[in-house]
Image (cartoon, rainbow, N blue to C red):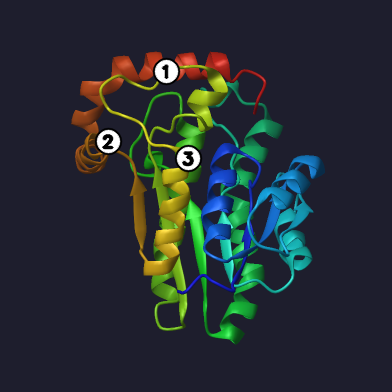
Amino acid sequence: MELAGKTALLTGATGGLGRAIAGALAERGVTLVLSARRADPLRELADSLPGEGHRPVVADLAAARAGERLVADAGDVDVLVANAGLPGAGQLDGYSADQLAASLRVNLEAPLEMTRALLPHLRELGSGHLVYVSSLQGKVAFPRSSVYSATKFGLRGFALSLREDLWDTGIGVSVVLPGFIRDAGMFADSGAKAPAGLGTSSPEEVGEGVATAIEQNRAEVQVAPLLQRLGAGFAHRRPHLAARITRRNAARTADRVIEGQAGKL
């Protein structure tokens, strides 16, 4: 898809990844409908982007049917980038019922709900693109991440299956899988360090990955250094063996993230 002149709805717009995605799309001539929970950061972001016509729409995707309302408020768009997500590190029995419901709703239910609401418009257009920002944890299981992995595995499976359903309609579907990210996401939020020796990617690389996914109609884009991508592929095929190799170090890293993110769910 040629992005210039298109309109995109971007959720989670004011986070580190969201800002980078917004910048990458705006630089390509996309008009953005920017969504997050707080109005002031959204307005600041809309005003800072190149181009004209960007506008904020406040939405809390943890609320019931918020995704459906957001699509209605956004109006006619050509592209959806479902980027909003809640952190999800921790043991399952450490979640309250409300925390569990919020994680499932924001990370998985809302993207499905927005897609269902948007599809009639895109089918009528006979074009468009749907992008879902998952994670390499949509392919690899880590300790202390059962809830987060459930949503990210689910989002990846949904996107790839939906792509097959829409293959001959003119509507593209992509899933973007960031690995360890510096300056944004769980390590930036928690102050924990990414595992040594595997490298990190920048938020701007994720933004470019999203743009590439749309422009080239890529099914899946992994935004991670080579060692992470190779490791994810191995763990995806040999989960038992991979867990034996990484279990101790991965658990320590997860515990540091949990401690740093306490109260942020």
Asked if 172 appears above or below 190 in the picture, the reply is below
Numbered disc 3: secondary structure: helix
Residue placed under numbered mark 1 in the picture: 193
Q: Indicate which disc residue 228 carries.
A: 2
Using residue 104 as the reference point, say whether residue 242 is left or right of it. Answer: left
Considering only vertical position in the picture, is 259 above or below 182?
A: above
Q: Residue at x 71, y 60 (%)?
A: 54
Quadrant assignment, res 9: bottom right
Please tell me whether residue 36 is drawn above or below residue 198 in the rendered image: below
Please report contact status of discs 3 and 2: CB closer than 8 Å, yes or no.
no
Earlier sequence position, callout 1 versus callout 2: 1
Across and down, in percent, residue 104 comes to: 60, 43
SS of the residue under disc 1: loop
Residue 73 shows in the view: yes
Q: Amino acid at mark 2?
A: Gln
> Quick one: label 3 or label 1, which is nearer the N terminus?
1
Closest to the camera, between mark 3 and mark 1, is 3
Q: Secondary structure at mark 2?
A: helix
Residue 131 coordinates in the image, percent (x, y): 50, 60
Number of other residues with Cα within 10 Å of mark 1, as a class: few under 14, some 14 to 19, many 20 or more: some
Give the amino acid at mark 3. Pro
* Residue drawn at (56%, 51%) of the image: 23
Residue 221 quadrant = bottom left
| N-terminal-most mark, 3 or 2 | 3
Distance CA(mark 1)–CA(mark 2): 15 Å
Q: Is residue 74 left or right of residue 159?
A: right
Residue position for label 3: 203
